[in-house]
Image (cartoon, coloured by chain):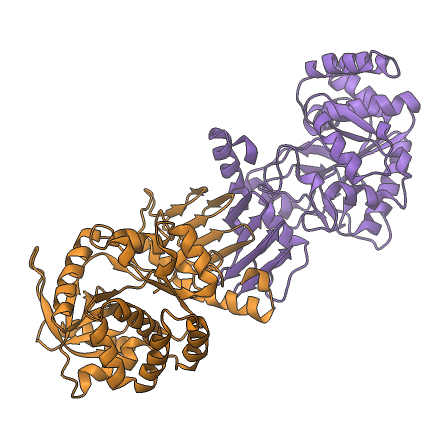
Chain colours: A orange, B purple
């Protein structure tokens, strides 16, 4: 899934250069890292990327080994359920029993080996007809993520090379801080990573049951695959889809109604980070002796715990700590590390001022 | 005097683009403001600028109305005494009784009308054979300036349009904080502005008495003025001069020995600022409603009392206060306003790292 258009990495991220196409705390763009992470397990020709038309060129540039037909174009952004549905009809067109591993293209995973081990285990369960997700072992009462409640009384202990597959009680949306704290102390909740595993047939059945309108739209598109009219049908039909996430549209109802599909979660402790804003880099990127995360040409004198990213030119700090400084060819951002979420205030102000060149 | 090579306005100021050629808190470069400030009183053809060879081109660009022969080239930097001596022999060559107003090219003066009034008064006294300086009414116990002690018991009161000319007791060098405080509370000290007034003949006589070696060097150069050998003589002789300031080499001894020359000071309250570092802009530049000094394309959200200067591109701050942020084509500076002096640490580090492109 490469449809994201995040603004939280402004000025590096822009409307036509969202986060997944940027190297953020990494050597390669996040989407390249995501594909390379799969390489030992998944042949390139089995990878599909769903993205907007205006990102196709970037994908080809960053991933030249990928066949052009591997990119499935979303005519418009409609959140994850339509995106995954579109991928599912294409996979089903080749093989309805094929297992799909649905992965965001803009997350960081520190432990690639551990990730592939879980991916393999999840895929095996998916092949048996289950819907599987990875749940991240939480480290703090984060209010920015959805949670997955386990049916069992406690989070499975880590067992070395073993993989523990648990039954999901339910998916819950982003909690407030008090609720998040109670989730953590209960020991029965994992973070929802947005990574899912199922066969194409199984997820399309779930769409039929829980999102019947979307299911019909997908059927219209599926009927046009391989025909000259595909693009026209896709454009017309996809726009009709409601914007809805897989979590809300499928995972929540599937675990709460009388749907017989087993839904499982595998607890994952794999150095996962959703790279939500500049300050997140401190959680996984390398630091210098003073705790500064530095990318590009930068000089920090008498300062600690800064995040400095220069795409072009020198960035020099003296006597500055706990601050984010980012320089691109046409802009500079300076904010407190604790206020990294407020970058969106700048993007909003630029939008209000119609500074299209900077959006 | 345009020989300065200040590094305290890095990254805007560079080896080949020192402060005087930059618009700092002003619309035009400081040297242009300095010349324009004189315009109502001094015809352009009477202005001489002393500067290094590598700054001649900048001077011609910024001051196209100036005759090329108005620039007196210093073959090397030797502080203010040799610089003023060089100017004096050229002025004396035309008219030894001409009054010289010696002015730094990189200071800000808010009250141009008041300045010209004092300049006129000082010049009249200089024509009578006195050596005159402007002493700035101090507003704080500044340790970065030299001071001028008055012979009288108290600083003359401001008297509307009147100009009070006082006798100097002595010139003193930069004090420590305790001493500076005692100067301020005594009411008998003014800041040394580095602005001097005297006839060419008078200052050359002072050189003869107090800096005889330099005086002989100047005589050798003076003898070559107007001859084909001038450049060669200048290069050879000027390099022999010791590096010494007019304050230390002439003004201190002239007021303390048996030199009969009267030395006067005029108390000046003219919005003077020596623009010593980025934080100084807050003292005279325009601010927005939140006390931010902004030049160029900048956006400050939820922040106060910043100094933001963008030569190129947008500089966006969110949640940042009391900070200096400067962007040029090839560099960004971020420092605390209180640490603006520490910019030199960056320049030192760049020099150590042989980053010649950024010096």
Of residues A184 and B131, the one drawn nearer to the viewer in this rendering: A184
Q: Is residue A38 left or right of residue A245?
A: left
Of residues B96 and A320, the one drawn nearer to the viewer in this rendering: A320
Residue A6, picture quadrant: bottom left
Q: Is residue B240 left or right of residue A322?
A: right
Residue A91, picture quadrant: bottom left
- The percent position of residue B185, horizontal first and vertical second, equals 63, 48
Which residue sits at x=57%, y=48%? Answer: B327
Which residue sits at x=58%, y=42%? Answer: B11
Q: Is residue B257 left or right of residue A283?
A: right
Q: Is residue A296 above or below residue B319?
A: above
- The percent position of residue A340, horizontal first and vertical second, equals 41, 62
On the question of residue B264 being in view, the answer is: no
Q: Is residue B46 left or right of residue A168?
A: right
Residue at the far front in the pictured view = A228
Which residue sits at x=49%, y=37%? Answer: B345
- The percent position of residue B317, horizontal first and vertical second, equals 52, 59
Of residues B305 and B135, the one drawn nearer to the viewer in this rendering: B305
Of residues B207 and A161, the one drawn nearer to the viewer in this rendering: A161
């Amino acid at each position: 899934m490469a449809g994201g258009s995040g603004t939280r990495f402004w000025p590096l991220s822009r409307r036509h250069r969202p986060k997944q196409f940027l190297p953020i705390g990494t050597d390669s763009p996040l989407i390249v890292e995501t594909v390379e992470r799969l390489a030992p397990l998944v042949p390139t020709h089995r990878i599909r990327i769903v993205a907007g038309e205006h990102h196709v060129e970037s994908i080809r540039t960053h991933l030249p080994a990928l066949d052009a037909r591997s990119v499935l174009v979303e005519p418009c952004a409609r959140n994850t359920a339509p995106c995954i549905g579109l991928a599912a009809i294409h996979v089903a067109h080749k093989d309805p029993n094929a297992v799909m591993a649905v992965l965001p293209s803009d997350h960081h995973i520190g432990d690639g080996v551990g990730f592939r081990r879980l991916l393999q285990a999840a895929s095996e369960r998916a092949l048996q007809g289950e819907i599987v997700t990875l749940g991240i072992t939480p480290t703090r009462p984060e209010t920015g993520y959805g949670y997955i409640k386990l049916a069992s009384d406690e989070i499975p202990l880590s067992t070395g090379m073993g993989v523990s597959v648990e039954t999901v009680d339910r998916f819950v949306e982003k909690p407030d801080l008090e609720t998040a704290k109670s989730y953590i102390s209960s020991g029965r909740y994992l973070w929802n990573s947005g990574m899912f595993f199922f066969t194409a047939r199984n997820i399309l059945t779930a769409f039929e049951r829980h999102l019947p309108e979307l299911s019909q739209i997908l059927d219209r598109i599926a009927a046009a695959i391989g025909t000259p009219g595909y693009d026209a049908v896709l454009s017309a039909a996809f726009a009709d889809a409601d914007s809805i996430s897989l979590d809300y549209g499928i995972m929540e109802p599937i675990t709460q109604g009388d749907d017989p599909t087993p839904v499982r979660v595998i607890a994952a402790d794999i150095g996962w980070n959703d790279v939500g804003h500049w300050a997140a880099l401190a959680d996984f990127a390398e630091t210098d002796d003073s705790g500064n995360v530095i990318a590009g040409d930068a000089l920090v004198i008498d300062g600690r715990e800064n995040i400095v990213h220069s795409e072009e030119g020198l960035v020099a700090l003296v006597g500055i700590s706990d601050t984010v400084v980012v320089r691109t060819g046409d802009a500079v951002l300076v904010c407190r590390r604790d206020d990294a979420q407020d970058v969106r205030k700048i993007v909003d102000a630029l939008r209000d001022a119609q500074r299209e060149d900077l959006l």
